[in-house]
Structures are given as structure tokens and as C-alpha cells.
Amino acid sequence: MNLFSESVGHPYPRLRRFAIDMAITAVFNLVIALIITYVMRVHTSFVVNLVVSMCIGILAVTFVDGGRLLLWGLGKPPKIPFILLVVAGLPAAQQLGKLIAAQFTGIPASYFFGAHQQNPAGYIVVTLLVSLFITWFFWNRSALAYLKAEAEVEKARAAAIEKQALQAQLQLLQAQIEPHMLFNTLANLQGLIAVDPPRAQQMLDQLILYLRATLSSSRAEQTTLGQEFALMEAYLGLMKVRLGGRLSYTLHLPDDLRDRRLPPMLLQPLVENAIKHGIEPKIEGGHIDVQAVTENAALMLTVRDTGLGLRDAGATSGTRVGMANLHDRLQALYNGNASFSLTPNHPEGAIARFILPL
């Protein structure tokens, strides 16, 4: 790996860190030039001292910080090798920086190398303080970066655990929905075997087709509206065999929404509830219309029936298995950003609708 290696979050994270440290060092070099000029009075020209300070400081950052990033990246460097890097890098930066400053200013290099003799005690103190500051600064920058990276890893781990727990919850709710529909169908099939064997055989064949269609998709984390509507067609076909002429249905799905992804088994509880509480108890039966549209940057799924409507208080209380599980799944999946409503359909029946954010 090198200084320009890529990682998540920024295309060149180490180069970005190097640039930030270089900018901070430039400010620090300005302070050093002021101290040397007006406190230590090593040279009367502030510009000359600033050039020398910049040359030495830039090289020190390049050797120490650049070497740290090149060798250990954004992680925390080992203490002893890092100290050795500082011990070797700072003197080299000081000597080479003076030579470069001499080229920029036109002043002989010997002047810079002998300047410390004007105030040797102050020069030693400043050099020691600068060395300690650079060591402390870059070491702590590495330590903070390491702690930040560890925090990000821990945050990602917690998010993964939360996602697994949510998926387990959704699978449990989904597993409750499927037996609800299956047991109702098997109970009707048991009754038909004795009184109408051909119709029982037809229902059994349709049930097998439906179970084959739902076997894989019902355990998936996501499905498409096209697949969901295909499953609804198989389900309603099964109910059509059971209810005969008392049930009719239509499905409306625009072609541009067929590939829209959504959690599986959302529509089935709505259709099942419409049949159980609306169509089946009604002597003459009724019609079910399933529709998907987009409106105001949201996906609106509607199940409209012409059954008995909301006469049964239990059907509107949200305590029934299908509706309760649907509500729980929406809350878990969309953090309260999805809405569900169950309202009367005029002149008769009910309208079940939920709106999902796109």
C-alpha cells in the first residue's frame, strides 16, 4: 500500500490526511518564524526566517508524517519505530531545509548553520520544543485516527447485528402469515373432499401450484411487484376455486412498476382479509381489485373489495393476525415512514391501502 491508496469514504484518505497535516504545520511554521525574529532575534528579517521555517517544517512533515502514512497508513504506528522515524527525520529535515532556504534567499548556507551560535540556549530550547511538539502531534493524530476507525468498525458491527435481529423478527412475522392462509385453505379442502371430490381435486391442484410459486419467494428478503402480483393471481385463483362464482377479481400493475422492489408477503394479508371478512361472509360474494400506483414520490398499494365492509368491529381493530403482522412489518421495515389505512368503500366493501416511500 502507498500514500495514494484508496479506501471507503474518501478516494485518497492518506493523501487527504497528509494535506491537512501540511496545512497545520504551515501555521506552526509561521509561529516559529515570529518567535525566532521577534523573541530570539536570530535574524532581523522576518521573511528570511519564515522561508527557513517553511523549508524545514515542510520537509519534517514529509519525512515524519509522510513516512508514517506510507509505512502504517491511518492506523496507530508502533511506538519505537515511530520514535526512530522522528529521530532520523527531524535532523535530516533541519539540515536539508537550511540548504534549500539558502537557495531561495540567496544567503550563504553557512549563515543558517551558524545562526544558532547567536543564541545557543534559545535555539536548543526551540529545537527541543519543536521536536516534542511534532512527535506529540503526529502520534496523537495517529492514535485518534485509530480510535475513530475502531469506532466505525464497532458501529458497522452493531448495525449488522441490528439488521440480523430485524430480519429474524420479519421472518417470524412472515411465518405467522403463511400458516394463517394455509390452514384456512386446508380446512375448506377437508370439507370439500366429502361433498364435492372433483372440486376438492381442483382446489388441491391449485394449492400445489400456489405453494410451488411461493416456496422460494416467501423466504426472500425482497421481491418485486411483478412477482408479488403473480403470487396474488395464483392465490386469488385458488380462492376462486373455493368460492366459485361468488368471487371475481382484477389486478392492475403498470409495466414501469413491475421491477419495483419491496418486502414479500405484503399484499397477501390484505387480500386474505378482504376475502375472509368481506367476500366470504356475503351471500352473493363480491369483487376484489388490487392496484399499484405511484403518487407524490410514494408507492401506493390498494386492495379494494365490495364485500360486507367494516361492519365487524374486529376486522378494524387491527388485532387479527394478518393485519397485526402487516402493521408490525411496516413499522420494522420503514421506521414509521410507511402508512396503512382501512376505510369504507362506497357504496359497499372496504379499502385497505398502504403507502411506502420510494
Image (spheres, rainbow, N blue to C red):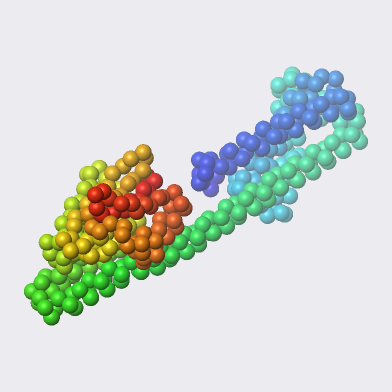
Q: Is residue 204 left or right of residue 21?
A: left
Q: Which residue lies furthest to the bottom in this view?
A: 194
Q: Is residue 246 left or right of residue 156?
A: left
For the image shown, how many numbered marks are present on the structure?
0
Residue placed at 24% from the left, 53% from the top? 348
Give coordinates of residue 76: x percent, y percent: 65, 52
Q: In this view, does 176 lie to the left or right of 248?
A: right
Answer whether residue 53 is visible to the viewer in this image.
Answer: no
The quadrant in which residue 279 appears is bottom left
Foreground pick, 327 / 139: 327
The quadrant in which residue 216 appears is bottom left
In the displayed structure, 336 sits above or below 161; it is above
Residue placed at 80% from the left, 21% from the top? 46
Foreground pick, 128 / 313: 313
Give coordinates of residue 183: x percent, y percent: 27, 73
Q: Is residue 118 left or right of residue 188?
A: right
Give coordinates of residue 266: x percent, y percent: 32, 57
Answer whether residue 210 is visible to the viewer in this image.
Answer: yes
Residue placed at 71% from the left, 21% from the top? 104
Foreground pick, 62 / 6: 6
Residue placed at 19% from the left, 55% from the top? 287
Give coordinates of residue 71: x percent, y percent: 61, 48
Quarter of the picture holding the C terminus: top left
The quadrant in which residue 326 appears is bottom left
In the displayed structure, 10 sits above or below 231; it is above
Foreground pick, 196 / 215: 196
